[in-house]
């Protein structure tokens, strides 16, 4: 099975184009004012036009209300809604019903019990994203450049479809893939020269490392 690779938090044409050239299957745009990766919906819509038909467009929001989601869908026309806040199962069902779009629900993981939270979303979320729990001083639910113990994922049923996130970079991606064996990965801060600024060389090196790890598997 081909590994899904999502590059998230993109804000420039150059970064979007390079991610696509390198083989990204998903391109993520972040709509959260506190994030250095935040992008205005109209700007994301223009970038999304470069992606459409070449990779899946993912809109990343945090506890967005219906009006905000309507704006994102109207301007960006995403393929997937990634919900990275405290959205309840009922809220996820409501969003799916009103938008007609699949949902990837993000969870912060630190200990084994954190994985039990997905049970109430079974049959509701289309896919999960497992990220590291934010540091105590962070206002960001993701994109903090920290990882969690990937061995915790060994307890999951193999049928659980998830993307692995949290501090992935060229130096640790081979180990992450070997331990967690996810169907998809999500990278953002590990490909940046400074918060919110994607580094094209780091993107190149990350994809090279992913390809080497896949060949060695």
Image: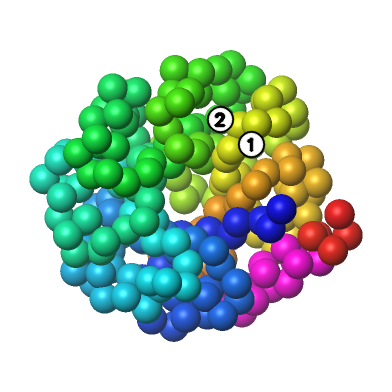
**Residue shown at 26% from the left, 61% from the top:** 77
Q: Is residue 183 left or right of residue 172?
A: left
Picture quadrant of residue 83? top left
Instruction: State the CA–CA distance, disc 1 to disc 2.
Output: 7 Å
Toward the viewer: 204 or 23? 23
Res. 91 visible in picture: yes
Q: Secondary structure at mark 2?
A: strand
Toward the viewer: 167 or 49? 49
Q: Are marks 1 and 2 in contact (CB under 8 Å)?
A: yes
Q: Secondary structure at mark 1?
A: loop
Judging by the rendered image, the residue that carries numbered circle 2 is 109
Q: Is residue 97 left or right of residue 81?
A: left
Judging by the rendered image, the residue that carries numbered circle 1 is 148
Q: Which mark is residue 12?
A: none
Dominant secondary structure, magenta: helix
Magenta extent: 200-212
- Give percent across and percent down for residue 119: 51, 18
Toward the viewer: 38 or 158? 158
Q: Is residue 42 left or right of residue 10?
A: left
The extreme right residue here reads 216
**Residue shown at 59% from the left, 59% from the top:** 5
Picture quadrant of residue 74? bottom left
Res. 34 visible in picture: no
């Amino acid at each position: 099975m081909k590994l899904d690779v999502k590059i998230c938090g993109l804000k420039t044409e150059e970064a979007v184009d390079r991610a696509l050239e390198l083989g990204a299957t998903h391109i993520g745009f972040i709509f959260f004012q506190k994030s250095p990766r935040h992008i205005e919906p109209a700007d994301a819509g223009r970038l999304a036009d470069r992606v459409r038909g070449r990779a899946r467009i993912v809109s990343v929001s945090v506890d967005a209300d219906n009006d905000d989601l309507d704006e994102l869908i109207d301007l960006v026309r995403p393929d997937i809604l990634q919900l990275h806040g405290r959205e309840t199962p009922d809220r996820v069902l409501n969003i799916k019903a009103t938008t007609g779009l699949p949902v990837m629900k993000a969870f912060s993981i630190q200990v084994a019990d954190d994985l039990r939270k997905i049970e109430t979303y079974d049959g509701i979320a289309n896919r999960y994203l497992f990220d590291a729990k934010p540091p105590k001083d962070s206002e960001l639910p993701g994109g903090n450049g920290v990882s969690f113990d990937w061995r915790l994922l060994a307890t999951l049923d193999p049928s659980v479809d998830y993307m692995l996130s949290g501090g992935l970079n060229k130096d640790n991606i081979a180990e992450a893939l070997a331990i967690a064996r996810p169907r998809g990965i999500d990278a953002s801060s590990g490909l940046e020269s400074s918060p919110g600024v994607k580094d094209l060389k780091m993107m190149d090196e990350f994809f090279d490392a992913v390809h080497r790890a896949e060949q060695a598997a």
